[in-house]
Image (spheres, rainbow, N blue to C red):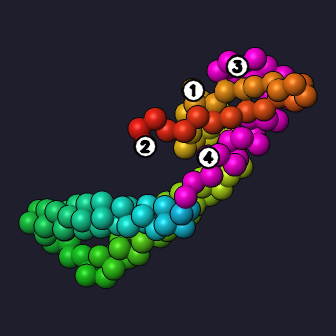
């Protein structure tokens, strides 16, 4: 059985979990989390501060409401906490078991189409992951 398909029985599912946990283990999971944090900060800090500045300018021109400068400090603290949460989720997604689950959903680091099953002479089903053809 040299076919690319979804597992049809428990032996194939067990082999799939083992193969995806080993072969799709992401490199540098902590670095991936840090990159996610930096990416979130690069996007969110200017966006939130720009929107807050525009809202404060609008409120200042239309009403007598004055917003204290500490609002920006609190907004940036919320942005930092959000970026840390994004980094934590990114790190959790790099755990091999969670990555294997994501692969079964089609969201892992290895596409489902790269996984195939073989049955050697010992009748033990094995799952293999093809290398990335672009590398």
Depth check: 100 or 38 in front?
100
Say whether residue 55 is magenta: no
Quadrant occupied by the C terminus: top left
- Residue on which the image places disc 3: 2
- The residue carrying pointer 1 sits among few (fewer than 14), some (14 to 19) or many (20 or more) residues within 10 Å by Cα, namely few
How far apart are the alpha carbons under marks 4 and 3? 20 Å
Q: Residue 135 — which label?
A: 2
How far apart are the alpha carbons under marks 2 and 1? 17 Å
Up/down of 134 relative to 49, above or below: above
| Dot placed on the residue nearer the N-terminal end, 3 or 1 | 3
Q: Are marks 2 and 4 in contact (CB under 8 Å)?
A: no
- Residue on which the image places disc 4: 24
Q: From the viewer's perspective, tell me whether residue 104 is left or right of residue 80.
A: right
Q: Which residues are magenta?
A: 1-27
| Dot placed on the residue nearer the N-terminal end, 2 or 1 | 1
- The spot of residue 37 in percent (x, y) is 43, 66
Q: Are marks 3 and 1 in contact (CB under 8 Å)?
A: no
How far apart are the alpha carbons under marks 3 and 1? 13 Å
- Residue on which the image places disc 1: 113
């Amino acid at each position: 059985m040299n076919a690319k398909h979804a597992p049809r029985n428990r032996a194939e599912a067990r082999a799939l979990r083992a193969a995806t946990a080993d072969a799709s283990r992401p490199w540098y999971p902590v670095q991936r989390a840090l990159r996610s944090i930096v990416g979130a900060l690069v996007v969110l800090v200017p966006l939130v501060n720009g929107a807050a500045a525009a809202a404060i300018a609008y409120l200042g021109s239309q009403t007598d409401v004055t917003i204290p400068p500490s609002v920006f400090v609190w907004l940036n603290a919320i942005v930092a906490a959000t970026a840390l949460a994004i980094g934590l989720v990114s790190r959790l997604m790099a755990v091999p078991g969670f990555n294997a689950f994501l692969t079964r959903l089609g969201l892992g680091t290895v596409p489902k189409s790269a996984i195939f099953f073989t049955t050697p002479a010992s009748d033990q089903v094995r799952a293999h992951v093809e290398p990335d053809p672009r590398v």
